[in-house]
Amino acid sequence: MDENTPRVELTPAAADLLRQLHAQHGPLMFHQSGGCCDGSAPMCYLAGEFRTGGSDVLLAELEVEGVPEPVTFWISRSQNEVWSHTRLIVDVVAGRGSGFSLEAPEGVRFLTRSRVVGA
């Protein structure tokens, strides 16, 4: 993949929700696991609330207009290998996911869409 191609992008709806969550909670982070069901959805936490380690990769620091610090986007190392040729697009859809992601009480959930960008 071209080094200039961002690996992660936000839809306008995702950026809006991040602004709202930041106003309510403060600095944020995402973790994209390789689990099944909702475990494969990006989970949004307070920055530092989800412990990352050697099995995780910092994939992006997302700049969101109106949010003073970047929203970090972490992914499990194994999932990063599987999705190495894709751009991850974080979106928002109606409905509650099952998990501890900060948006759950809002009646929506983050969803990762992907687009192949090259080999």
Image (cartoon, helix red, strand yellow):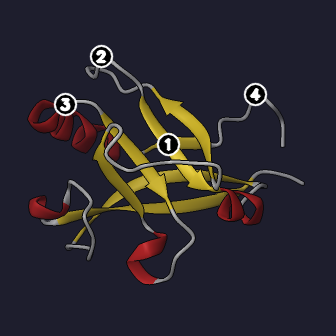
Residue annotated with mark 2: 68
Q: Tell me how far mark 3 sits from mark 2, CA to CA.
A: 10 Å
Residue annotated with mark 1: 73
The percent position of residue 95, horizontal first and vertical second, equals 20, 73
64 relative to 86, above or below: above
Residue type of the residue flagged with mark 4: Asn
Residue visible at 20% across and 73% down?
Answer: 96
User: For numbered disc 4, what is the local secondary structure?
Assistant: loop
Residue annotated with mark 3: 26
The percent position of residue 66, horizontal first and vertical second, equals 25, 20
Q: Earlier in the sequence, mark 1 or mark 3?
A: 3
94 relative to 49, above or below: below
Q: Is residue 97 left or right of residue 78?
A: left
The percent position of residue 18, horizontal first and vertical second, equals 27, 39
Name the residue at the right extreme.
119
Q: Are marks 4 and 2 in contact (CB under 8 Å)?
A: no
Q: Are marks 3 and 4 in contact (CB under 8 Å)?
A: no
The percent position of residue 42, horizontal first and vertical second, equals 43, 59
Q: In front: mark 4 or mark 1? A: 1
Q: Earlier in the sequence, mark 3 or mark 4?
A: 4
Q: Is residue 80 left or right of residue 3?
A: left
Q: Earlier in the sequence, mark 4 or mark 1?
A: 4
User: For numbered disc 1, what is the local secondary structure?
Assistant: strand
Residue visible at 84% across and 43% down?
Answer: 1
Residue annotated with mark 4: 4
Q: Earlier in the sequence, mark 3 or mark 2?
A: 3
Residue type of the residue flagged with mark 1: Phe
Q: Relative to the observer, which residue lies in front, 107 or 80?
A: 80
Q: Tell me how far mark 4 sits from mark 2, CA to CA.
A: 23 Å
Mark 2: give few (<14), some (14-19) or many (20+) Cα within 10 Å: few
